[in-house]
């Protein structure tokens, strides 16, 4: 199925945040030039008068990750696709503030839910977004009705020794990237940018999908003159991160989830350090979730973007079904 001509039927929105907004584009070193501060950006699909499904992308992706999937979902349901802080068109964190990606995402979703005063929410997330949804469902079990996770079951599980050993490397890399200036951030032509993204994802994205992600994943450089672009995401997101979880902690969170859950795993999908943990966490969730559906579907980690027609019927049925 060719999605090259997919035209988003969505509206750009900005949600105020203490440091900026979620969904605007900023780059460390030249925030004053290109960033509208204090927001998180998003794409609102469908009716504006309805509470939307909150949709969250993966690490270093953006809200465009769902541009091919959302048009295949029910038109009478609203969807709010977020750009997480530092991603897509959302504001970057100020200098000195670290990205704790799982925990930042959990807090951002909570801020947005409280900002709009939504109740009984539904979350759909891919990769990091699914992990954030997992944490939200476990942390606020009385405030969520449904969770849809795409090619992820929980936050990345790490062995305790690996968590400890990564700490120093993460801090040093963060400090290195924080000191980059605008003239040290590389710029590329449009074709070079698409080639870089296509190669970096190692077969997870098609070239067409790479172009879709880069619609909000790159920004014109040098004031928009010439064929020159840089990535819109914060370079500090390249840091491995702190705040990973051991399997014991993840299983305890899993035991708190009581909402309905739909989990779709790509085959081969994403590689995990300990693939056996996926079903271990899934089994723990079955004990407490009011309903759990699990499907394996042929595709890469970005199955939802490359081949949304393979999974949309599972999501449509799950969303349309009344919460038990």
Image (tube, rainbow, N blue to C red):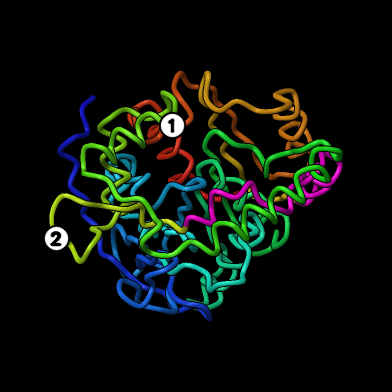
**The residue tagged with tag 2: helix, strand or loop?**
loop
Q: Residues within 10 Å of mark 2 (few under 14, many from 20)?
A: few
Residue at (56, 73) in percent of width and height:
111
Q: Quadrant of residue 73?
A: top left
Residue at (86, 40) in percent of width and height:
160
Identify residue for label 2: 225
Identify residue for label 1: 201
x and y percentages locating residue 300 in the rendered image? 45, 24
* Residue 143 colored in magenta in the image: no
Name the mark nearer the viewer: 2 or 1. 2
Q: Tags 2 and 1 in contact by the CB under 8 Å rule?
A: no
Residue at (36, 45) in percent of width and height:
66
Choose between 7 and 89: the one closer to the eye.
Answer: 89
x and y percentages locating residue 20 in the rendered image? 46, 77
Choose between 296 and 162: the one closer to the eye.
Answer: 162
Residue at (44, 25) in percent of width and height:
202
From the viewer's perspective, is 314 left or right of 224? right
The answer to whether residue 11 is above or below residue 166 is below
From the viewer's perspective, is 263 left or right of 201? right
x and y percentages locating residue 183 in the rendered image? 36, 61
Magenta-drawn segment: 235-256
x and y percentages locating residue 324 in the rendered image? 61, 49
Q: Name the residue furthest front.
A: 183
**The residue tagged with tag 1: helix, strand or loop?**
loop
Task: Residue 215: give its label.
Answer: none
The answer to whether residue 24 is above or below residue 198 is below
Q: Earlier in the sequence, mark 2 or mark 1?
A: 1
Alpha carbon separation for disc pair 2 and 1:
28 Å
The answer to whether residue 180 is above or below residue 154 is below
From the viewer's perspective, is 247 left or right of 213? right
Q: Quadrant of residue 16?
A: bottom left
Q: Residues within 10 Å of mark 1 (few under 14, many from 20)?
A: few
């Amino acid at each position: 199925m060719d999605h090259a001509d997919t035209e988003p039927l969505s509206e750009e929105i900005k949600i105020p945040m203490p440091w900026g907004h979620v969904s605007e584009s900023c780059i460390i070193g030249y925030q004053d030039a290109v960033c509208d501060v204090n927001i998180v950006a998003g794409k609102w699909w469908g009716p504006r008068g309805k509470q939307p499904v909150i949709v969250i992308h993966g690490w270093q992706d953006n809200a465009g990750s769902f541009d091919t999937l959302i048009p295949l979902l029910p038109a009478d349901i609203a969807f709010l696709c977020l750009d997480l802080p530092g991603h897509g068109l959302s504001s970057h964190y100020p200098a000195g503030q670290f990205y704790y990606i799982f925990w930042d995402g959990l807090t951002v979703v909570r801020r947005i839910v409280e900002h709009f005063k939504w109740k009984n929410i539904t979350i759909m997330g891919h990769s990091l977004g699914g992990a954030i949804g997992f944490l939200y469902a476990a942390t606020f079990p009385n405030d969520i009705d449904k969770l849809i996770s795409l090619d992820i079951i929980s936050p990345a599980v790490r062995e305790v020794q690996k968590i400890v050993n990564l700490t120093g490397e993460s801090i040093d890399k963060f400090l290195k990237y924080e000191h980059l200036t605008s003239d040290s951030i590389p710029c590329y032509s449009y074709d070079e940018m698409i080639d870089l993204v296509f190669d970096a994802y190692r077969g997870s994205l098609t070239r067409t999908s790479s172009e879709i992600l880069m619609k909000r994943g790159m920004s014109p450089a040098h004031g928009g003159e010439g064929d020159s672009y840089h990535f819109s995401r914060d370079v500090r997101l390249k840091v491995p991160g702190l705040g990973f979880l051991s399997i014991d902690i993840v299983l305890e969170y899993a035991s708190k989830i009581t909402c309905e859950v739909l989990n779709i795993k790509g085959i081969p999908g994403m590689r995990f350090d300990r693939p056996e943990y996926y079903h271990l966490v899934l089994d723990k969730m079955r004990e407490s979730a009011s309903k759990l559906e699990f499907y394996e579907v042929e595709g890469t980690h970005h199955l939802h973007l490359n081949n949304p027609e393979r999974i949309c019927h599972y999501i449509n049925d799950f969303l349309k079904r009344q919460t038990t």
